[in-house]
Amino acid sequence: IGRMASLLAAPLLMAALSLGRQVEPETSLGENTFDRSMKLPEKIILGYANWCECDNKIVKAVEDGVNVVVWFNTNLKQDDDGNAFVESCTNLTCVAKTAKTLEERGLSTVHLMSIGGWNSPHPDTAFTGQEWFQAWKKWNTETAASETHGFHGFDGFDWDIEGNDDQHSNWNMLPTKTLNVMGEMSMEAKKHGYIVAMAPAQSYLDASAHEASYKLNNNPSVPDWHQDFPYHGRNNYAYLLAEYGTENFDLVTLQLYEGWSRANYEITKQKVTPSEYVRSLVKRMDEGWQVTFPDLGEKKVSVPASKLIVGLANGWAKDSNGKFLFIQPSELAAASRSESSAQQLQHRGYGFWNIGDEGTAEVHLASGLNAFMNTRNQ
């Protein structure tokens, strides 16, 4: 999750699995297919691993409250022979060992793998969404899974397709051809019982904006707010919900910590309290909003509160001169303890970028959120 223009991706340690295109996609849900979305907890604290991270901080974060881990990252690319391959920078043996450790400690955890990230390539559209799912499934069951450690592979994937520092990069467009590959792959994954999540920057799925664009290098849509920052989207991910339906996406982690986000404007400039902003955001996204697409016309999109994860930044954001919104867990806890909280629309939970930065600037989001979410025993 790039989280910032000018964030440089860690050098990728390529672990690629080449797969031929000539794979017949499966077309129906098998009778014995397990719906992995049933593993998702009622209340969620979702933690993103840092780029290529697999270390003891993952275990600590889960002990402190995280119950959904999104490992980071993979890319869907084409190799030199023209075959689809899943590129990963994460040590998959380490992932399997970590999953086993968590299981042995009685810490039930959902494991997802991200696709994309800031400055990362977008899925190669030489392949259909169905073909990409077959490639990903093969990688997941034959390469990521480890019989030795009892790890059956990831429970699903998380879309994190974003922009690029280079204003002239092709990755600063998210055209319908790419979005359709994402949507088709998501539908195929759901048919086969996998969890499908997405993590749009707030501008990529903005309930306060009604315009959609396929560019990812726009200025902020708030007129008097950092118009010198050309790294925002315009409801790009709304296309996926409009065309493929919310039923094909289990979780939506909305990045309130996007550079100069709308949430940042409302909370720091308009002085809306974080708890009140989250309450109104959840209601607005649940009710839905009209979006005008270049080629679809006007469509209503929504994110049910039961699928919404409010995305936060931990301590790394405190040293950003206000560019990235930082919210203390205590500022959100107050809302959950208020007398009217039981009557309020409750979102599914919180997520944060990233586990590797837990403890930076003395910020521990996993335990801070768990203090009022109660996802783990304290």
Image: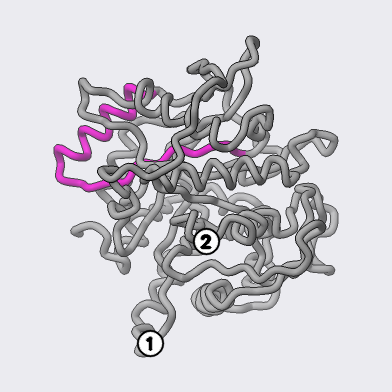
Locate the N terminus by quadrant.
Answer: top right
Residue 343, numbered circle: 1
Q: Is residue 219 left or right of residue 117?
A: right
For the record, the magenta segment spans 92-117
C-beta proximity under 8 Å, tags 1 and 2: no
| Residue located 61% across and 78% down the image | 272
Residue 247 location in percent, x, y?
A: 48, 60
Height in image: 158 above or below 275? Answer: above
Residue 371 location in percent, x, y?
A: 30, 65
Give amino acid for label 2: Thr
Q: Nearer the viewer, mark 1 or mark 2?
A: 2
Q: Nearer the viewer, residue 238 or 277?
A: 238
Residue 154, numbered circle: none
Q: Quadrant of residue 174?
A: top right
Height in image: 134 above or below 4? Answer: above
Within-10-Å neighbours for mark 2: few <14, some 14–19, many 20+: some
Within-10-Å neighbours for mark 1: few <14, some 14–19, many 20+: few
- Name the residue beneath numbered marker 2: 246
Height in image: 249 above or below 278? Answer: above
Residue 343 part of the magenta segment: no
Locate the C terminus by quadrant.
Answer: bottom left
Q: Is residue 48 left or right of residue 141?
A: right
Choose the circle earlier in sequence order: 1 or 2. 2
Residue sitting at the far top: 81
Residue 114 part of the magenta segment: yes
Answer yes or no: is residue 359 visible.
no
Q: Nearer the viewer, residue 72 or 260?
A: 72
Give amino acid for label 1: Gln
Answer yes or no: is residue 244 visible.
yes
| Residue located 21% across and 25% down the image | 149
